[in-house]
Structure formats: C-alpha cells, structure tokens
C-alpha cells in the first residue's frame, strides 16, 4: 500500500479523562470535569421534540444562540463566535494568529489544547513556571520575547484549580506588551464564589487585546453536544469567521445551548452543590493526608506528597471499585497527583466509602 507522506508533529495527542473500565458496565466517572448534576431538565424537551429535523444544515452564523448569549452575559452579539466546544475556538485562534516560529506562552501546568493547537500551526511553546501550582505573572513576563504572540491561561486553571485574583489578572494585562493577545479561558468561571475573583469576560469585555473563552460543557452540562464560544474585538471575530468551518454546531446543540441559558435555577443549584461537595471532599481527603487546592472550580487537584499511599496505587484501587479519576501524569506531567471531579451526591458518597475502605486495609 502506498502511503502519501504527511506532516510529522512532535506532539503528544490529547488523552481525555477515561470513561470506562473493563468488566464494569457502569462506572463512576470523576475524570473529565463534567457537570455533577447532568444537564438542565429543560433540555429534555428539545431532544424529545417531534418536529426535530436533521436533514437541514444548521444556522452557520448561530444567530439566535449568539443573541441569547449576548442578552445573558450583557455583551455584544457581533463580538461572539461559537465553536464546537471552546476547543474549536482555541484551534481557530491559533490558526488565525500564529505562523511558524511565533511564540506562545502557556503556564507549565495548563489545559493541554493550547499547546497542542499552537504547535500544530508551527508555533514555539514557551512554558512559564508556576509558583505553588499557581500561575505566576512574573514568570509569564520573564518569558516574553519579540516573538511572543499569545499568552493562554485558564482562570481558574485546569488542572491545578488555582486562580489569579481580579487584581492579578488586571496586573498581568497591564504588564504584557499591548501587541500580545491575552487569551483568558473562563471555562469554570460560573463555579467561582470567591470574592477576589472576576471572570475574564467581566474584566476585559472592552479590551481589543484580550480574547475570552467560554463553554457549555461544564456547568451547563452539554459536554457531548460540543458548544463553546469566544469573545473578542470585532476585527478578531471577523477574522475568525473567515476560517470557521461553515456549519460547526449542529441545530440540536444550538437549541439545547439556548434552552440551557434560560434555566438559572439549575445553574444556582449546580454552584451550591459544587461548593458544598468540594468542601466536604477536601476536608474528607485531608484526614488521609491527601491535600488539595482551595475550593474554586468543579474539581480538586489531589496531592499525595504527605500521604502514606501514592497516587498511582490510589488510582488503581479506585479503578478496581469502578471509580475513575484523572491521571495528571498523562500530558500534564504532574507526578504523585490526581484530579478529582466533584460528582453527584451519590457518586461523592460512593467515592468516600471507597476511599475509607482503601485506607482501612
Ligand atoms: C480550561 C479548559 N478550557 C477548555 C476546555 C474545553 O472545553 P470544551 O468542551 O468547550 O471544548 C476544557 C475542558 O476540560 C478546559 O478544562
């Protein structure tokens, strides 16, 4: 067979949090930071709508969805671009801005897709060290060169769960050269109840050199439907619209996302649930000397440095009980740690029972 030569990338493909275990029909999946309460019950009406039709192309301009987003988040619909997950928006940003040898700064421990998409278009990835697993402004500034084009960060950050305060984020934008695009990924913003926090969208709505990422995959519970959005200057959005795949979000996904925006009660319930169980789990794990970040998003980064068991052993033992956490060695290169997504009430209880039995032995 003849194989036509293709480009070689020095990239490790993204490995998502695992979702199945051999021999288990049903597992407790706490590995991908999905919504603990599932999706709003209102979405069920969309899916069961008899008039649902799949033979038409969806609205490639996502007009209604953008208009509903703009109402909800008090922003300009013409400065929104929707993607198949915020993932696709990250990809488009890299395609639009980066050429080979441009430099992109990412925090050492950060969402992997920034580096993957940037590398695919030939950019050089420059890692900025973190301090105690928190993004460091001074380390980012140290890494700036004439070639720096974009700084990517998630706030709160995945996988560390730490965050930059409102003051720190503003300081970072001030200290960065004006011609560097700061991308602030607000994927977990809705979960944040911390007084010193403000989302990228709230802080930088009117900044031409900041681009914001948002997603329906986390608190809105629509990870499988793939809907995310970006917010930036009109010029950037116009540029992105030229390269955007024409029909990137299915009709049903657009409708479900629109519906999810109307259920504020579901969002409030999700935030409350998250804060209660994140706090419970943090204190519960502390008893076993498994430490974690302060409560922020819908996950905890578990540190086993002081624990009598190591992360790998703990991961394996849980897996044998049908519970999956996220290995942070794959891709993130964080040793002796694991990422735990806050689950539903029954998932969290089963997780805690499993932990108790692991430590009893
Ligand atoms: C920080 C961050 N940004 C973006 C994403 C991707 O989300 P989406 O499902 O919208 O592509 C994730 C997913 O885990 C994430 O953690």
Image (tube, grey):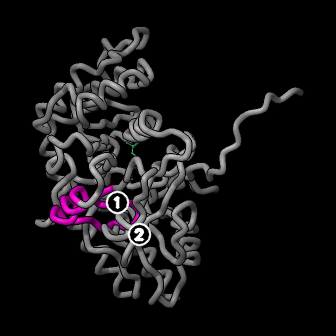
Can residue 106 be seen in the rendering of this structure? yes
**Circle 2 SS class:** helix
Q: Residue furthest front?
A: 146
Tag shown at residue 351: 2
Tag 1, which secondary structure?
loop
**Which quarter of the figure has residue 271?**
bottom left
For image coordinates 31% across by 58% down, the residue present is 344
Report x, y in % for residue 45. Answer: 25, 26
Which residue is found at the position 39% from the left and 70% from the top?
Answer: 301
Outermost residue toward the right in this view = 1
Viewer-side residue, 249 vs 80 = 80
Seen in the picture, residue 220 relative to 361 is either above or below; the reply is above
Estimate the x, y position of residue 43 in percent, counting from the top left: 26, 32
The span shown in magenta is: 154-174
Residue 282 rendering spot, x and y as whole percentages:
31, 76
Along the polypeptide, which appears first: circle 2 or circle 1? Answer: 1
The residue positioned 28% from the left and 43% from the top of the image is: 211
Where residue 257 sits, quadrant-wise, is top left
Q: Which one is in front, 177 or 277?
A: 177
Q: Which mark is residue 343?
A: 1
Q: In this rendering, would 35 be left or right of 25? A: left
Of the pair 229 and 139, the residue shown nearer to us = 139
Q: Are marks 2 and 1 in contact (CB under 8 Å)?
A: yes
Q: Residues within 10 Å of mark 2 (few under 14, many from 20)?
A: many
Residue displayed at 43% across by 70% down: 129
Q: Quadrant of the N terminus?
A: top right
- Give how far across and how far down residue 123 sits, in percent: 53, 46
**150 with respect to 174 (left or right):** right
Q: State the residue lying farthest toward the top.
A: 56
């Amino acid at each position: 067979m003849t194989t036509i030569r293709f480009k070689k990338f020095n990239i490790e493909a993204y490995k998502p949090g695992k979702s199945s275990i051999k021999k288990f029909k049903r597992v407790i999946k706490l590995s991908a930071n999905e919504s603990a309460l599932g999706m709003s019950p209102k979405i069920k009406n969309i899916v069961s709508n008899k008039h649902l039709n799949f033979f038409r192309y969806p609205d490639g301009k996502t007009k209604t969805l953008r208009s509903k987003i703009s109402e909800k988040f008090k922003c300009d619909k013409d400065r929104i671009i929707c993607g198949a997950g915020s993932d696709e928006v990250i990809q488009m940003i890299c395609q639009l801005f980066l050429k080979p040898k441009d430099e992109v700064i990412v925090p050492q421990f950060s969402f992997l897709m920034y580096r993957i998409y940037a590398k695919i278009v030939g950019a050089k990835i420059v890692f900025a060290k973190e301090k105690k697993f928190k993004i460091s402004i001074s380390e980012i500034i140290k890494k700036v060169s004439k070639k720096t084009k974009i700084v990517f960060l998630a706030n709160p950050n995945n996988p560390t769960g730490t965050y930059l305060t409102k003051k720190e984020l503003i300081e970072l934008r001030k200290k960065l050269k004006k011609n560097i695009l700061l991308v602030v990924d607000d994927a977990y913003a809705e979960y944040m109840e911390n007084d010193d926090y403000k989302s990228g969208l709230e802080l930088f709505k009117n900044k031409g050199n900041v681009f914001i990422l948002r997603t329906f995959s986390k608190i809105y519970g629509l990870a499988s439907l793939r809907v995310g959005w970006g917010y930036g200057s009109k010029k950037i959005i116009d540029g992105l619209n030229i390269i955007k795949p024409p029909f990137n979000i299915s009709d049903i996904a657009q409708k479900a996302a629109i519906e999810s925006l109307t259920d504020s009660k579901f969002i409030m319930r999700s935030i409350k649930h998250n804060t209660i169980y994140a706090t419970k789990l943090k204190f519960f794990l502390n008893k076993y000397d498994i430490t974690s970040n302060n409560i922020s998003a819908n996950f905890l980064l578990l540190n086993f440095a002081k624990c009598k068991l190591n992360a790998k052993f703990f991961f394996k033992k849980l897996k044998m009980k049908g519970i999956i956490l996220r290995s942070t060695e794959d891709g993130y290169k964080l040793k002796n740690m694991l990422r735990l997504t806050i689950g539903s009430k029954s998932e969290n209880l089963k997780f805690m029972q499993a932990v108790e039995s692991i430590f009893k032995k």
